[in-house]
Image (cartoon, rainbow, N blue to C red):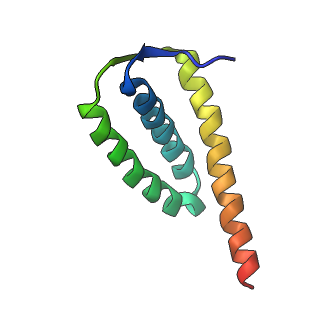
Amino acid sequence: MSMHISGSGEKVVLYERIKFLEIAIEVANEDEESEAIASKLEAELQQYKDRYESADGSVLMDASGKFELKMRAKMYIQMIRDSSAQKTENRT
């Protein structure tokens, strides 16, 4: 499946990251264990939104682009959880 985001300029990259982070925050909020992850992602999201506002270009994304971002976000959150669990195991 290919990403269905199109546009021009830096906004395309920033838009993809913003949408990815929004979805990753939703995924993280589905699990109480991941609330700390969600708050870190929210801070990162705000930085990208600020940059997006001042960037040049335009962006469009269709439904399949959003679906792909959701799948990537779920894998990302799981990777963060696994990494956190591994760090906890290494401390003991």
Estimate the x, y position of residue 84 in percent, counting from the top left.
65, 66
Of the 4 image quadrants, the one containing the N terminus is top right
Give the left or right position of residue 36, taking residue 57 as reference: right
Depth order, front residue of 55/42: 55
Depth order, front residue of 7/18: 7
Q: Is residue 38 above or below residue 13?
A: below
Q: Residue at x 59, y 63 (%)?
A: 33
Q: Give the image quarter of residue 15.
A: top left
Residue situated furthest left in the rendering: 54
Q: How many marks?
A: 0
Of the 4 image quadrants, the one containing the C terminus is bottom right
Give the left or right position of residue 24, taking residue 48 as reference: right
Q: Residue at x 59, y 24 (%)?
A: 67
Q: Is residue 81 above or below residue 66?
A: below
Estimate the x, y position of residue 43 in percent, counting from the top left.
38, 54
Depth order, front residue of 47/33: 47
Q: Give the image quarter of residue 40.
A: bottom left
Q: Is residue 85 above or below residue 37?
A: below
Q: Residue at x 69, y 62 (%)?
A: 83
Estimate the x, y position of residue 86 in percent, counting from the top left.
74, 69
Residue situated furthest bottom in the rendering: 92
Q: Residue at x 36, y 42 (%)?
A: 48
Estimate the x, y position of residue 74 in percent, counting from the top left.
64, 42
